[in-house]
Amino acid sequence: MLTKAYAAAVLGIGAVPVEIEVHTVASEDPRTRIVGLPDAAVKESIDRVRAALRNSLFSLKPLSVTVNLAPADLRKEGPVYDLPIALALLASAGVDELPLLREVPVLGELALGGTVRRVRGILPIVLALRARGFRAVAVPMENAGEAALVQGIDVWPVRDLRHAAELMSGRLQPEPATADLAALLAQDGTGEDFADVRGQAAARRAIEVAVSGGHNLLMIGSPGSGKTMLARRIPSILPPLTPDDALEVTAIHSVAGALKGSHVGRRPFRAPHHTISDAGLIGGGTHPVPGEVSLAHRGVLFLDELPEFRRNVLEVLRQPLEDGAVTIARTAGTLTFPSRFMLVAAMNPCPCGFAGDPKRTCRCTEPAIRRYRAKVSGPLLDRIDLHVEVPAVPFEDLSRQSPGESSAVIRERVLRVRALQAKRYADTPGIRCNADLPSGRLQELCPLEPAAEVVLRSAMNELALTARAYTRILRVARTIADMAGSDIIARAHLFEAIQYRALDRSMW
């Protein structure tokens, strides 16, 4: 007897519906075959299915079973097909009538006792099934909150195999899960507060400029000057995620198996260790999954001790920094993962960390300093908009009792500037802030007063800046002018933007 069920396969950060056909024939020599490009986890599913059926008190006579997963040319991975295969096997063997199996896709991994376990990639799967026209989907209880974020499709939480059979037979009325994403986002906090930071007025100003325009930032300073502390508070002044962005970010984390809870409610802050591989940073593997640059999408990627990262790892950042996406090609196909993030990096000025420190002596030789700095290539530095020096904090600032300016106050200013940019770029799809400003519109959107034009020409000639540096200086100057409420970029705005190219000025 032939029975059909439906599930889906994750592909990149999307999904493709999968039709599961189970054909059974009574046999004294029971055998099971799974066809349709299954991986090892899918091939092993039949052992989990048989044990779960027995432990759920379903009795099967000896059967020869063929399971086909269509489309046959798409590789099927993971244990997500356990539950639909088990239900289709029950129906095909005549143990139970499950008429809803043809209408409601089913997803979930089976424990040997019959419990349904959570699986990854549920959000993109439910989005794909809704797009295909399905009106309901059965998912593991642990995934129900995540799946319910998708509007327009009923989500049926499932506890175990017998519960799923009762739902698919129609004997048990489903209780669809619900979620209000906007309300959930409003409940999420903003994290660590800038009020904890003492001193560092210049660095705080540079961070506000960077966040206001979505610019990349590099902080250079001696050990203990507060670079990491400052970086970890950046998410607290970023604009809140919109519901659409939250869905996109949650889908990426779900596919990567990095989702904690039902959704991502705050902008991501990813801080990988410097021993990370290029595949871990950019994404990849035999069957590609998102890397840190995609997990940081719509948030912050923080690279502490930047020169300690392997050079080949840092160089793969060039494409995602320019394009906002990373493309991974493998034999099985080519996948593109979004990676529109704000890069924040921190480093010491030399191996010992005290080059240029007025109070502590640097022990490094000139060749050692050059080798250390050469670990960060010029092309990568060119893609970082602001280079900021973070000096050691004096005792007077550390001992001050009054807190610094809070994140809430800074965030209000950031939101005002971001709203101005959103209005400016309303007619340009894909452009949200000044960091995304296309070079073709620089002359139109970055008008300079005559004195500012003289300053820029002089800086380009004296500092031998590249065309990319020129573009990034104008973008940063545009942000500074927005913060000052000016339509035209004045001389003072441009001076501040050039000041943030510290490594260009020092001929790094």
Image: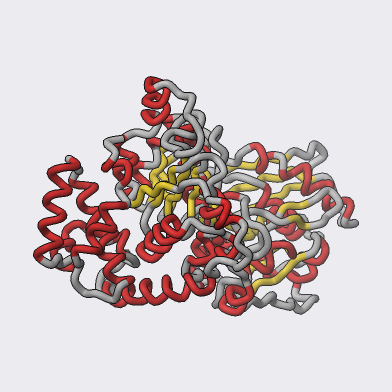
Q: Residue at x 67, y 66 (%)?
A: 101
Q: Residue at x 43, y 36 (%)?
A: 349
Q: Is residue 314 above or below residue 139?
A: above
Q: Is residue 330 visible to the viewer in this orientation of the structure?
A: no
Q: Does residue 443 appear to the left or right of 378 in the view shown?
A: left
x, y percent for residue 472: 26, 53
Q: How is the image coloured?
A: secondary structure
Q: Is residue 432 above or below residue 499?
A: below
Which residue occupies the foreground of this view, 372 or 177? 372
Q: Residue at x 38, y 35 (%)?
A: 315
x, y percent for residue 227: 51, 48
Q: Quadrant of the C terminus?
A: top left
x, y percent for residue 265: 58, 67
x, y percent for residue 373: 39, 31
Q: Does residue 208 appear to the left or right of 479 in the view shown?
A: right
Q: Quadrant of residue 150?
A: bottom right
Q: Quadrant of the N terminus?
A: bottom right
Q: Quadrant of residue 311?
A: top left
